[in-house]
Amino acid sequence: MTAAETRRLRAALEARVLERAAAFRERHAPLTPDRMAAGIGFRWRVAAIAGRDGLLDAASSTILVAEGQSPRRQRFTLAHEVMHRLIEEDGELLSDLHEAYEGAALERALERLCNLGAAEMLLPRAEVARALAASGPNPRLLWELADRFGVSEPAAAVAVVGALGPGSLAAVFGGCPPPLSFPAPPPTRGTVLPEDHPLAAVLTTGLPQRGTLELPGGARAERAWARPWRGRVYLLATGVEAAGG
């Protein structure tokens, strides 16, 4: 398979996942936690899960959600696990997934697609597109869309990055845990801002920054927009290339 064919196949995978997520939302709205789980014939409960946000236990038809999550995060975790089930039930989608990826890349792609589908369930891409058309890639969308649709900021970040397309990145520095970033290239979760980094100045001065930006971890963003809000720095960037890219 050529590189161009692989790109087309991966784009088709994303489109198929978005379609399945949108169809699930339309069938089972409003997407309360109980309705999401019941939509795949499961129930759900909070449990102690080491090192994971959620777990799909097919043997007991139960979705386990890690304790200690906020209600918004619980909804996203549930939607993510529901997407695992929907993908498992789609033989054609699974076949294409294995054709496009292998090894560790397959697992990473599956998790990314489940995040993408979960974001679509809870925050429709059409709504994200309308918000982007009105304001451009403004980082305030990360908290505004989260509040509007009752989702977590990471879920809003996944939805916005998905709508912006390849080479885009959303990150939040500050708070707990710092930062939340989707996807990688760097910065990755847990990256600490150096005191002399321009993004640190956004927080200390309270002034936004726009333009080309070298990101912590070595990536470079051709177009970055950072804004302070409630003691955090919210970043949206496009034209992102990993270090050495």
Image: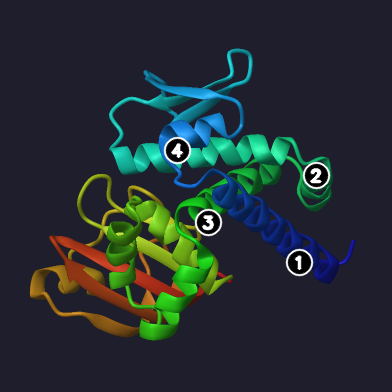
Residue 45: in sight, yes or no? yes
Comparing 224 with 15, the one in front is 15
Q: Residues within 10 Å of mark 4 (few under 14, many from 20)?
A: many
Residue 142 at x, y percent in the picture = 33, 64
- At label 4, the amino acid type is Thr
Circle nearer the viewer, 1 or 3: 3
- At label 2, the amino acid type is His
Residue 57 at x, y percent in the picture = 57, 20
**Label 1 – label 3 distance at C-alpha:** 21 Å
Residue 186: in sight, yes or no? no
**N-term-proximal mark, 3 vs 2:** 2
Tell me whether circle 4 and circle 2 mark residues in contact (CB < 8 Å).
no
Q: Which mark is residue 7?
A: 1
Residue drawn at (73%, 40%), measured in percent from left and top?
A: 103
Circle 4 sits in a helix, a strand or a loop, which is it?
Answer: helix
Residue drawn at (63%, 57%), measured in percent from left and top?
A: 18
Residue 179 at x, y percent in the picture = 31, 53
Residue that mark 3 sits on: 120
**N-term-proximal mark, 4 vs 2:** 4
Q: Residues within 10 Å of mark 3 (few under 14, many from 20)?
A: many
Comparing 139 with 202, the one in front is 139
Circle nearer the viewer, 4 or 3: 3
Q: Which mark is residue 77?
A: 4
The image quarter containing residue 170 is bottom left
Circle 3 sits in a helix, a strand or a loop, which is it?
Answer: helix
As drawn, is 205 to the left or to the right of 195? left
Circle 2 sits in a helix, a strand or a loop, which is it?
Answer: helix
- At label 3, the amino acid type is Glu
- The number of numbered badges drawn on the structure is 4
Q: Which mark is residue 98?
A: 2
